[in-house]
Amino acid sequence: MSREPVAGIRLRRSLRSGRVLVGGGIVLLVLFAALFAPWLAPHDPGEQDLLANLLPPAFLAGGDTAHLLGTDSLGRDILSRLIYGARVAMVVAIFAAFFAMLLGGAMALIAGYFGGRIDWLISRAVDAWMSFPPVILSVILMVGLGVGLFKVVLAIVLVDWTRFCRVVRSEVLVVVSKDYIAAARLVGFTDRQVILREVLPAVLPLMITLLSLEMGIAVIVEAILSFVGLSVGANIPAWGVMIADARNYMYQSTWSLILPVLAIFITVLGFNLLGDGLRRTLDPRLLQDRRVEA
Amino acid sequence: MVATILRIIFRRLLVAVPMMLVVSMMIFVVLRLLPADPLAMSLPPNATTAEAEAMRAALGLDRPVAEQYLIWLGHLLQGDLGRSIQFRQSVSSLIATTLPATIELVISALVTGIALGIAGGLVMFHVRGTRKEPMADLASTVLMSIPEFLWAIFLILGFGVALDLLPFIGRIAPDYTVVRRSGFLLLDTLLAGQLAAFLDALTHMILPTLALALALAPLIMRVLRSSLLETILEDYITMARLRGLSERRILIWHALKNAALPTLSLIGVQAGFLFGGTLLVEVIYSYPGLGNMMVEAVRNQDLPIVQGVALTYCLVVLLLNAMVDIAYLVLNPRLRPQ
């Protein structure tokens, strides 16, 4: 029995799920904006026009079609800043979530497969890590590391690997107790071969689901950090920075506050819909539950 | 029975001690990575080299990191968290003034969030198998995508700016003077018999409480729904049905009680997240709690405060987790040690 057809069936089933399509669509759209920001943005995101500050969006009274979504307190074009802000959000989402998955997944495989003292040690480390509220730990890390895009990614990886580790480890424990793992050992597979060829593929769907959800979390954490001024430098447009700026002018211009909030919400919703849809189509246990319910 | 429960509590708290040690070590090490020299922040700019050396020795910064940690830990055990650089005041007294505000907010948010979550979970369970189910499912995914700080802003824009219904700055209007007894404003105003001040403090808490509660509720909602779905298949539910009990009575008195356990352990984990979430909500509402103080300290590079507040956060989370675990063990006889 080869694995290819199963993966194919899963993939096709995923693509038929509305959540995966809508969520994936949103994510691709944001990714597109991030990749082609210099071509899509009508203005330079840092370009100030103090004579045209706090303009409402073009479709409202007093709006200017030169600034489709209006301008902020320094007269910078909000649409352009939103498009450039997608870059920070997507870079952080993709890299932080991927490396958190790599680190957390590796730890989980080692802990779950070898058990015993290694498992004890890794599990206790996860417990200690989790007694930090994630926001607090990332704030301390950023204070220690200093600001910058790479450091935000590093901080989120160091905070969130535990989410993967805890969930994947318990899944690994279930897989390791299966007969085919024992069979693989009997056939003479080395530990590394068993882990990479048998255990990893079994927990991969779970990891992919978590990855998508983690990307949403990473977007939120980056926004929180940039809101308190602990993310990228002040001259780089990020959604959290836009919210922090607009908060001081919310009576004069509500839109400059609402728009970045919506950008974060829609992006996170995209990742969550995608993750939720993948979980429904990829998780074999959930499918079994469905059958029981039906 | 009482002896068993006391033993459970004692054992669980014992586990928290080494954890706290590890956590304190982590905080210490991370903050020592700091590129800035902590010395530079605690000296006037025209200090001489000799003065700098004297200060370095006084703060113990000339010794190896491990020794520095032990000195810090020693002081910590005596309740001494050092002195704030910007306020020239002991960090422990600063924490003592701000912690009650945060705890007040966390408690009201937890209670509200749990109530909303249980109500939502029951609604989602109620619509199972009907045409409304996919809608409810989708609504819960949408709700899960709104973190507390986005709620905070939505609520300010809606109820504060647009409708002008509720206050969204600070803990109480500045025209009230409340004698400080416990630091818990709601309690202090009641003790002093200042009803108007109590109501004012209460209205100040509504929006930040809701922001935190609305972020917590969808998670509780989902877990409660799925554990209700599992519980409802159990034999004793069928038995209750055969005894002719109404569906409502079965749901409230039999199913909900048993489905509460997984929900409880989720609340334990989430209480920690919620406590961390207060950081930003406090900043957004200018609410004078721990989070606001920490962000302020970060901006001013006031390391002793950052360190002390981070430690306080972890201590409270560990205690919260221990409390939930204890509640779990007490409520579930099967898990009690024989």
Image: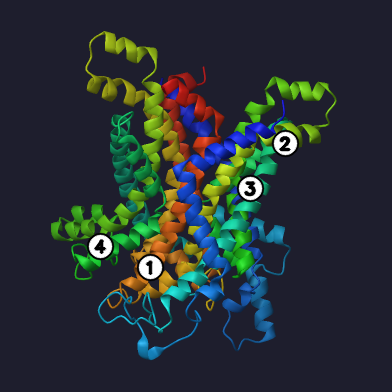
> What's the amino acid at mark 3?
Met
> Horizontally, is A93 left or right of B230 in the view?
right
Circle 1 SS class: helix
Quadrant hosting residue B50: bottom right
Point out residue B199 in the picture as x, y percentages from the top left corner.
17, 57
Q: Looking at the rendering, in which quadrant would you find the N terminus of chain B?
A: top left
The tag earlier along the polypeptide, 3 or 1, is 3
Q: Which amino acid does label 4 sit on?
A: Gly
Question: The disc labelled 2 sits on which kind of residue?
Answer: Ile
Residue A101's mark?
3
Q: Which of B132 and A228 is in front in this view?
A: B132
Q: Residue B313's spot in the image, x, y percent? A: 48, 53
Instruction: List the residue tagged with mark 4.
Output: B158
Residue placed at 42% from the left, 45% from the top?
B271
User: Gap in Å between the C-alphas at discs 3 and 1?
Assistant: 31 Å
Report helix, strand or loop for mark 4. helix
Q: To which residue does mark 1 refer?
A: A259
Which circle, 3 or 1, is nearer the viewer? 1
- At mark 2, the secondary structure is helix
Mark 3, chain letter? A
Query: Which one is in front, A88 or B110?
Result: A88
Which mark is in front, 2 or 1?
1
Residue A8 in view here: yes
